[in-house]
Image (tube, rainbow, N blue to C red):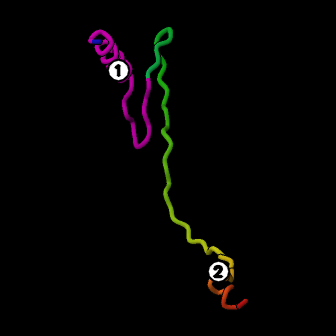
Amino acid sequence: MRRIAAVAIITFAVVTMGCRKTGEGEFEVERPVVGTTTDTVLTPSVDVGTDTMTVKVPDVDITTPDERRQQNP
């Protein structure tokens, strides 16, 4: 179990060493190719807003069993 944890930590360290943040939502990633290439990865942004909507609710008349008994004695 210790070996798996050690391998996971080393893998995480190697992966994160090749990345650095260059701006808001931008990361620069170096990929090992013959030599190295650098790509800029743009992370998605989330825009949260609110909309006001009017919902039409149908008007339904319901007669309860007590009301039906009073109507039909």
Looking at the image, the residue that sits furthest to the left is 2
Camera-nearest residue between 39 and 59: 59
Identify which residue is drawn at 47% across, 23% down: 38
| Residue 1 vertical placement versus 69 (above, below) | above
Q: Position of residue 54 (x, y in %)?
A: 61, 75
The residue type indicated by label 2 comes to Pro
Position of 65 compared to 6: left or right?
right
Snapshot quadrant of residue 72? bottom right
Identify which residue is drawn at 56% across, 71% down: 52
Camera-nearest residue between 69 and 37: 69
Identify which residue is drawn at 66% across, 90% down: 70
Quadrant of image for the N terminus? top left
| Residue 54 vertical placement versus 27 (above, below) | below
Position of 24 compared to 53: left or right?
left
Quadrant of image for the C terminus? bottom right
Front disc: 2 or 1: 2
- The reply to whether the magenta stretch includes residue 42 is no
Q: Position of residue 12 (x, y in %)?
A: 35, 20
Badge 1 marks a residue whose secondary structure is helix
Q: Position of residue 58 (x, y in %)?
A: 68, 77
Position of 41 compared to 9: left or right?
right
| Residue 59 vertical placement versus 27 (above, below) | below
Give residue 65's mark. Answer: 2
Q: Residues within 10 Å of mark 1 (few under 14, many from 20)?
A: few
Please provide the residue range marked out in magenta: 2-29
The residue type indicated by label 1 comes to Phe
> Counting residues from the N terminus, which is met first, the one under dot 2 or under dot 1?
1
Q: Which residue is mark 1?
A: 12
Identify which residue is drawn at 63% across, 73% down: 55
